[in-house]
Amino acid sequence: MLRSSLQAYSVHLFTATGAVFAMLALLDAAKGDWPMMFLWLVVAFIVDGIDGPLARKFHVKANAPKIDGQLMDLIIDYLTYVFIPAFALFQSGLLPGWTGWLTIIVITFASVIYFSDTRMKNPDNSFQGFPACWNMAALVIFALQPTFWVILAIVGFLTLAMFTPLNFVHPVRTARWRAVSLPVALVWTGMAGMAAWQSFEQPQWASWALVVTTLYLAFAGIAQQIIPHTRHAR
């Protein structure tokens, strides 16, 4: 019993490191060190991908009930997925004048509403609506450096997509196509880390890999809604 409790609370402590990585990312963002900021966000992204399976493995709700792991996860996710990436888009100069102000207001306002929506998770553990992964969107924007009109179009589309019945896969928890989704997510993480490590001067093949994996993760859930899910009879 004691061992199970210690393991479960250790998972909570592991999840809490995401707040530290968020602070380190924010400190680098304040200095305008965008590559280092995104490296810390990638580390936080990895922690977020690992702590869920660990929480389920060690039954944290039963063995460590004094701490609400889901609430902790949501707080950290809002910082690393929304708040810091929105600040980076504003402060970096990629969105001049009114476009930067509009972007941070739209992203932070719409995302906090989405995070509070009780319908954000589907029965198959996919997300209903774009799951406010602005860290991923911002990193791709920094890596590809599109014009501010393209950035505005991306922000507008993703914001609207948060409040639609469109599905977005969870690479770890959505069972359908997980054999593809999980490796794609791992490749995305590797390419994202490479782009940030190389100060967004990554080779062209890495940029293409980032684009292709991003498109898969963005549209796989929608494709699953269109393509019937056939079950093999036993």
Image (cartoon, rainbow, N blue to C red):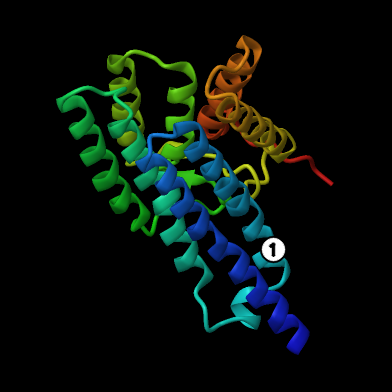
Name the residue beneath numbered marker 1. 54
Q: Is residue 231 left or right of residue 38?
A: right
Left or right: residue 36 versus residue 63 is left
Confirm whether residue 164 shows in the render: no
Vertical relation: 97 (above or below) 27: above
Where is residue 177? Give x, y as percent: 69, 36
| Amino acid marked by disc 1 | Leu
Query: Which is nearer the eye, 31 or 76?
Result: 31
Q: Is residue 14 visible?
A: yes
Residue at the farthest bottom position: 1
The residue drawn where x is 40% and y is 47% is: 26
Q: What is the x, y in percent for residue 186?
A: 68, 36
Q: Which residue is outermost to the left?
A: 98
Which quarter shows the N terminus? bottom right
Say which residue appears at 71% left-offset and 33% top-offset.
180
Q: Position of residue 21 (x, y in %)?
A: 52, 53
Q: How many C-alpha atoms fall within 10 Å of the one at disc 1: few (<14), some, or many (≥20)?
A: some
Residue 220 against residue 132 in the figure, above or below: above
Name the foreground residue: 56 vs 86: 86
Snapshot quadrant of residue 8? bottom right
User: Residue shown at 68%/30% (left/top)?
Assistant: 187
Residue shown at 48% from the left, 30% from the top: 139
Direction top: furthest residue: 204
